Image (spheres, rainbow, N blue to C red):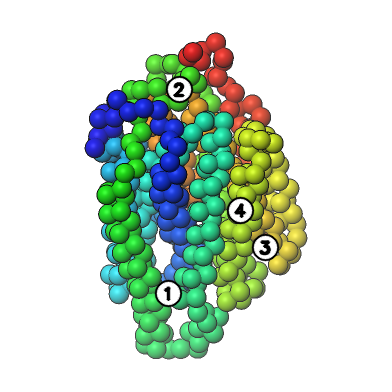
Amino acid sequence: MSANSTTSNPSPTVKSNGPIIIIGVLFFIFGFVTWANSTLIPYLKIACELTTSQAILVTFAFYISYAVMAFPSAWVLRLTGFKNGMVVGLLVMAGGALLFIPAAEARSFPMFLLGLFIIGTGLALLQTASNPYITILGPIESAAKRISIMGVCNKVAGALAPLILGAIILKDSEALQTRLATMDAAAKAVELETLASKVVMPYVLIAVALILLSIFIYKSSIPEIRAEGEDDLGSNTINRKNIFQYPYLWLGFIALFLYVGAEVLAGDIIQIYGNSLGISLDIAKNFTTYTMITMLVGYLIGIAAIPKYLSQSTALRASALIGIVFSILAMFTNGYTSVLFIALLGLANALVWPAIWPLAIEGLGKFTKTGSALLIIGIGGGAIIPRIWADLGVHIGLQKAFVILLPCYIFIWYFATYGYKLGKATTEVAK
């Protein structure tokens, strides 16, 4: 079904919970696959004998795919429609997961990175489809609440992923590192090949789950959203000639770019950061789960409070201020306390994504898909900000390098306070 075949559809606001449940399952998949990277970083550091800076390429390969593939994803969605686009995205992800089989056999870090890039490509397509979809399934004023519900699905999976994957591929990792330090080259190669093989079965199962889900969605009755030329956001649409005439969208893109970088530092990097402080990897491998738990708390607050008690912009301002405070505390405390404040950044981060999306795409009308693709490019911040953190860490230490978080949260506060209003003059809103 093409997007252009939906011109006779009614408003995308639906009474059935079926579409929301299906999108919730997709967000669960996003979370599991994405936050599995937090365990892959220390795992591949050992299995492929990498430095910390090299291991961070896991996040770079995964998140840079969003920046590369977001606009091509929008083009695919125009051809396929959102439903079939989701199916294609799931199948692409499955292909990337299966590439882990030859990567493990060859213990090839570049091949692992290629697999992660392909998985990210599929996710870029899914995210480009699902985020605007859940945004317009109901009133724009409560979009952050719906996205928060999706966030719960995402972060429950994110909490489970490092626990499950860590128990399989990082079991007794501290003892393994001790043994490897005393082995000759031949024995070490055998041990590392055994370690590399542990990742095969989890990613085969992930691929099978993705294929089954793609079949389910293909056969489901999930409704298509309106065509690109239609009034996607009703009476709030601001009619302009091109996407460059929506300054609040571009500021939202920058805010999302910086936010995703901050989220990846709090979620994916926390394990390797804890280990750098001398905390055993057997303990540090669970730190991502703590970040996900604090994010879950934040999402539950959003579900309860938005829009009844808090507006989306107010929630975003509060989140940015909390992020600034916790970042400073993480930089100037020690050991487990510093790690705790990095984990607590999950609380600061939880409502940022749900609030930025509706504030940034409100009123785009026929440009909704293109604007959504631009925001998906912002996920590339997860590739760039951790890379800057790692490079800074070489010179000033990994803990002090968290100073990179401060400009991120300061800009998010600016967007929540002033930026989201730029270009939303009420006289230009279509009635």
| Residue 32 marker | none
Pick whichever of labels 2 and 4 is earlier in the sequence.
Answer: 2
**In front: label 2 or label 1:** 2
Q: Residue at x 45, y 75 (%)?
A: 169
Tell me if mark 2 has few (under 14), some (14-19) or many (20+) residues whose alpha carbon lies within 10 angstroms of its own: some
**CB atoms at circles 3 and 1 under 8 Å apart?**
no
Look at the picture and state if 103 lies above or below 356.
Answer: below
**In front: label 2 or label 4:** 2
Pick whichever of labels 3 and 1 is earlier in the sequence.
Answer: 1
Pick whichever of labels 3 and 2 is earlier in the sequence.
Answer: 2
Pick whichever of labels 1 and 4 is earlier in the sequence.
Answer: 1
| Residue 47 marker | 1
Pick whichever of labels 2 and 1 is earlier in the sequence.
Answer: 1
Q: Which residue is mark 2?
A: 234
Q: Helix, strand or loop at disc 1?
A: helix
Mark 2 → mark 4, Cα distance in angstroms: 32 Å
**CB atoms at circles 1 and 4 under 8 Å apart?**
no
Q: Which residue is mark 4?
A: 295
Of 350 and 241, nearer the camera is 350
**CB atoms at circles 2 and 1 under 8 Å apart?**
no
**In front: label 4 or label 3:** 4
Mark 3 → mark 1, Cα distance in angstroms: 25 Å
Q: Amino acid at mark 2?
A: Gly
* Count of number-bearing discs: 4
